[in-house]
Amino acid sequence: MPPPEPLPEPAEIPALASWPASDTLDSWNLLPTEPDWAGGFAEWQPGEAGARERLEDFADRVARYAEQRNFPSAEGTTRLSPHLAFGEISPATIWQRTAQLGGSTGTFLGELGWRDYAQNVILQLPDYGARNAKAEFDGLRWRTGPEAEADLAAWQQGQTGYPIVDAGMRQLWATGWMHNRVRMIVASFLIKHLLIDWRRGEQWFWDTLLDADYGQNAVNWQWSAGSGVDANMFVRIMAPLTQSPKFNAADYIRQWVPELAGLPDGEIHDPSLPVCGYPAKLVGHVEARARALAAWAALR
């Protein structure tokens, strides 16, 4: 460390003497038309040029990264993850562009290093996305059956009755991306409030995230569950109703949960009265916490 300067791009890449039979990209009909469900993806500009533009935008903000990254209503994160996932920019390029910019840049570089950590875990444990790293979790009694499936569907659709959770899940569905702090909140909610196997969440993120990366996705979900090789404790249960005001998520909720847009900041995180069109909580926080701790106690 630090990583070396990236190599310059080649002046040319010689073409093959003969090309194998292939399809045209248009023939795959990848772009949705009837209906066009990808309108929210329009802000993403795939390719190296889009990645460079994102990096330059973030370079102006990296010095304030530590103070802004946890606030969903602020533009504190890099938005580079899809470009990294598709290899449109390298971690070394990002490191070299930002390392000397001062402020809390060191905090960001540490986060960038976690990507390499995740890749290292996958090299050692290739089935990390499908198997508990800690064998004791194989005995945890996750909820299954029709009621659990209905709760899973409500979580996927942003209909849990917890505004910060619902905002995150709706942002994911509409744009293919979710704020990093909210990812932790929704993951903890599925695993510990709903007591649903982390692999169901990992699979949903894999299907819906533009930045889906096997190593990152698996490591982050196992961290949230506590089942990973270097993970959060299962008994550490995030409280969404506390996290939401702590990180000033009111405007974020207004953007993604319009049913609650008219509520003041003091109410929007946990409406005290029913709101027309917005669901009641799937489960109370105290009840959910007790259920999760009982499942853990039974396992132990």
Image (tube, rainbow, N blue to C red):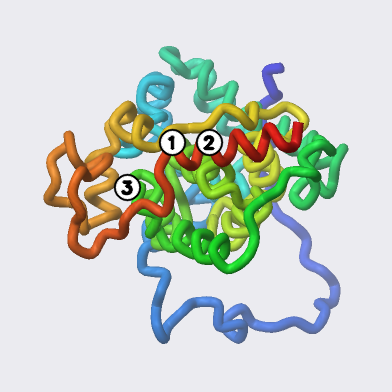
Is residue 11 or residue 275 the one in the foreground? 275
User: Which residue is under mark 3?
Assistant: 163
Is residue 224 or residue 286 the one in the foreground? 286
Q: Determine if residue 56 is in view.
A: no
Q: Quadrant of residue 62?
A: top left
* Secondary element at tag 1: helix
Q: Is residue 163 left or right of residue 113?
A: left
Q: Determine if residue 68 is in view.
A: yes
Q: Residues within 10 Å of mark 1 (few under 14, many from 20)?
A: few
User: Which residue is under mark 1?
Assistant: 286
Mark whose residue sits in front, 2 or 3: 2
Query: In the rendered image, which quarter contains the C terminus?
Result: top right
Q: Is residue 200 above or below residue 100?
A: below
Three-letter amino acid code of the residue under disc 1: Val
Query: In the rendered image, which quarter contains the N terminus?
Result: top right
Q: Is residue 229 left or right of residue 169?
A: right
Q: Residues within 10 Å of mark 3 (few under 14, many from 20)?
A: many
* Secondary element at tag 2: helix
Is residue 214 or residue 155 the one in the foreground? 155
Q: Residue at x 27, y 55 (%)?
A: 257
* Secondary element at tag 3: helix
Is residue 112 or residue 48 the one in the foreground? 112
Q: Position of residue 26 (x, y in %)?
A: 57, 82
Q: Position of residue 76 (x, y in %)?
A: 37, 32
Three-letter amino acid code of the residue under disc 3: Pro
Q: Position of residue 5 (x, y in %)?
A: 66, 27
Determine contact: label 2, label 3, CB under 8 Å. no
User: Which residue is under mark 2?
Assistant: 290
